Image (tube, grey):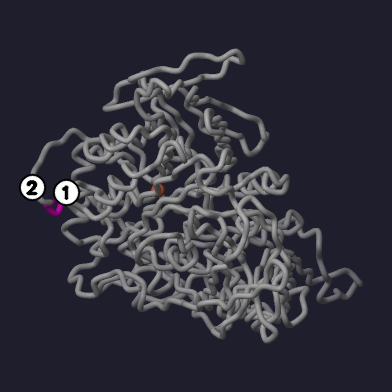
């Protein structure tokens, strides 16, 4: 599983390749031309730009910077201070826990509570870890807590706290009045089964200079081995076999029971801190962001029918069983019709008022809207094209992401492409040496989302569903001529039988075109040079990318020029007639969760629609017609649509 070279001799950020790339970005942006490697003054520019770019790209919240602050001792103790939880000593698989802090003499906006796991995690000042954080691109006054909290919340989130509406009298005065009054705050935490026990810790002095006041006792989960977070993916185009993948604290094989009494045994895998990327300076995944993933179980169920409903459950007598789930197989490749949802860059967000590492604010509305669609039974499959969970080295967030998508991914085929936030890290084999995966280097991604790829760390594949052939690439692995992936995508697209699957859709993560303000750093121009000709040669109908966090679609586009523009049909919908093929239509669909990107003030000629709202795309393909819709996840309204026909 190991991706990285442990022989890397320099910390990631000081890796020459890394410096060169960011130096180039700075010089492009500032129009300052220099071919020299950074001097000490340009190094600070590099650092500034890297941090700026990192902050823009990663939207580092204040909470994330918590780990870069010094933890000091609280100077005073309060004899009345208490922290408690309204739950039994053994936690269920999902619950909202009310954490109550009482006995506070003077309400302040500096108090906060963190949920940590496992309970023995060190949340003390950890000065030797200071170096570890430099690779994140933030070289400011560094840390630190020794282990990162799962989530945290200020006591002032309780609207009654600062005004002390919930008070107790701890000491009566001589005249019968209260001489010592204390205040109480209650904060709700959404907790899911992450297998390792948890603890709530009360801090004072805010995120900037926290000190520990109180801890609860450790709270274990009642069933840490419980099979959870099952999701399904296609293994081939026949749609008669499907892969079920789930997570459990137990390494013993379990089963999927499905259909009428059929059963198949799971293969079990896991990964460790040693499987994560890093160098002399450890990555978040190797160190302060690590959380034990338990065991990933996967099993391929066979003998199914395409486009057919069936039920399944997974687990064993020893660890218990999941609920029974209703699932529908996608249509077989070559059949007449497919309805699928597609998007990129979704991530996750807390379902409580806490903060956590790397929140994608649109993700909840997008998941909820798509879950409604899936529940109607009209959706055949889902394609999530990169930047999946944004765990980026904070491993517990994979559990929260898997929990979030369960209503979708357990019921229809959930197919994925890899993004920079799953794969990239210096000296690890990724095309781009940025630290965007936080040291994960694709290992957790490939464990949780086992696509029909040929080998580990070669995450490109094709699949056919209904009348569509999907060619799915990794923009994060070499794709230039002569590379293994280039040869594969060339032969894959050339081999498509367009009578069997008239539609050819090309999926990847980084776009070839965007008119977002971030275009300079989001688009690799070599992608247009080397890969776009293959799309034209093979008459690709539709190209879907993410990475840029908005929605944008193009004309029939090649080398930055419109080869054809759509005409309005009787309903006023833009329509391309690919019976007279001109070039691929491209759409950026990275609007599924991450903070939205702004567009440049002027749209280029090739850009036909630009929308910066959260949502997803809904694509309905029949043999002679492909209908594309962009759905606003907050309003459920169709904000844009277009058609490609072959008649
Ligand atoms: Fe991305």
> In the rendered structure, which segment of residues is drawn in magenta?
38-43
On the rendered structure, is 374 left or right of 204? right
On the rendered structure, is 434 left or right of 104? left
For this rendering, which residue is in front, 238 or 632?
238
Give the SS element for disc 1: helix
* 235 part of magenta stretch: no
Q: Where residue 104 sits: x, y (%)?
A: 71, 69
In the image, farthest residue toward the left = 36
Q: Where residue 77 sits: x, y (%)?
A: 62, 79
Q: Earlier in the sequence, mark 1 or mark 2?
A: 2
Q: Is residue 103 above or below residue 524?
A: below
On the rendered structure, is 289 left or right of 425? right
Mark carried by residue 36: 2
Q: Is residue 543 above or below residue 48?
A: above
Q: State how many labels appear.
A: 2
* 41 part of magenta stretch: yes
């Amino acid at each position: 599983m190991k991706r990285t070279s442990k022989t890397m001799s320099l910390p990631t950020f000081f890796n020459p390749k890394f410096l060169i790339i960011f130096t180039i970005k700075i010089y492009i942006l500032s129009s300052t031309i220099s071919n020299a490697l950074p001097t000490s003054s340009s190094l600070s520019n590099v650092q500034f730009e890297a941090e700026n770019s990192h902050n823009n790209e990663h939207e580092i919240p204040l909470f994330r910077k918590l780990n870069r602050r010094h933890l000091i001792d609280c100077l005073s103790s309060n004899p009345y201070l208490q922290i408690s939880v309204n739950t039994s000593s053994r936690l269920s698989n999902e619950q909202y826990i009310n954490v109550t802090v009482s006995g506070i003499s003077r309400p302040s906006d500096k108090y906060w509570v963190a949920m940590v796991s496992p309970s023995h995690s060190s949340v003390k000042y950890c000065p030797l870890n200071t170096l570890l954080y430099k690779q994140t691109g933030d070289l400011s006054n560094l840390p630190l807590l020794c282990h990162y909290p799962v989530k945290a919340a200020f006591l002032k989130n309780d609207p009654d706290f600062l005004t002390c509406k919930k008070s107790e009298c701890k000491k009566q005065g001589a005249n019968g009045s209260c001489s010592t009054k204390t205040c109480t705050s209650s904060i709700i935490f959404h907790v899911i089964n992450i297998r390792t026990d948890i603890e709530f810790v009360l801090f004072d002095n805010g995120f900037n200079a926290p000190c520990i006041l109180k801890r609860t006792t450790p709270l274990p989960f009642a069933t840490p081995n419980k099979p959870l977070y099952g999701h399904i993916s296609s293994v081939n185009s026949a749609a008669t076999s499907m892969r079920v993948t789930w997570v459990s604290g137990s390494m013993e094989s379990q089963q999927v029971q499905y259909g009428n009494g059929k059963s198949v045994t799971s293969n079990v895998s896991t990964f460790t801190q040693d499987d994560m990327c890093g160098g002399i300076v450890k990555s978040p995944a190797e160190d302060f962001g690590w959380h034990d993933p338990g065991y990933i179980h996967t099993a391929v169920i066979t003998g199914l029918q395409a486009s057919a409903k069936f039920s399944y459950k997974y687990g064993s007598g020893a660890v218990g069983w999941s609920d029974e789930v209703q699932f529908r197989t996608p249509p077989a490749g070559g059949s007449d019709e497919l309805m699928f949802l597609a998007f990129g860059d979704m991530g996750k967000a807390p379902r409580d008022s806490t903060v956590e590492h790397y929140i994608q604010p649109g993700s909840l509305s997008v998941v909820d809207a798509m879950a409604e669609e899936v529940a109607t039974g009209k959706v055949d499959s889902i394609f999530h094209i990169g930047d999946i969970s944004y765990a980026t080295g904070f491993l517990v967030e994979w559990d929260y992401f898997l929990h979030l998508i369960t209503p979708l991914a357990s019921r229809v085929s959930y197919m994925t492409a890899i993004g920079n936030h799953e794969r990239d890290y210096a000296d690890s084999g990724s095309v781009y040496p940025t630290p965007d995966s936080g040291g994960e280097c694709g290992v957790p991604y490939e464990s949780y989302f086992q696509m029909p790829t040929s080998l580990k760390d070669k995450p490109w594949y094709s699949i056919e569903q209904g009348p569509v052939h999907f060619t799915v690439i990794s923009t994060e692995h070499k794709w230039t001529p002569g590379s293994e992936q280039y040869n594969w995508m060339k032969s894959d697209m050339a081999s498509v039988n367009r009578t069997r699957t008239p539609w050819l859709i090309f999926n990847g993560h980084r776009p070839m075109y965007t008119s977002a303000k971030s275009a300079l750093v989001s688009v690799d121009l070599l992608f247009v040079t080397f890969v776009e000709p293959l799309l034209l040669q093979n008459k690709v109908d539709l190209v879907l990318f993410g990475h840029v966090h908005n929605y944008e679609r193009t004309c029939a586009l090649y080398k930055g020029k419109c080869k054809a523009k759509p005409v309005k049909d009787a309903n006023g919908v833009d329509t391309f007639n690919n019976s007279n093929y001109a070039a691929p239509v491209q759409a950026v669909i990275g609007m599924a969760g991450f903070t939205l990107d702004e567009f440049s003030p002027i749209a280029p000629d090739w850009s036909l629609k630009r929308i910066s709202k959260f949502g997803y795309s809904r694509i309905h393909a029949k043999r002679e017609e492909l209908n594309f819709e962009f759905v606003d996840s907050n309003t459920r309204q169709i904000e844009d649509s277009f058609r490609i026909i072959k008649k």
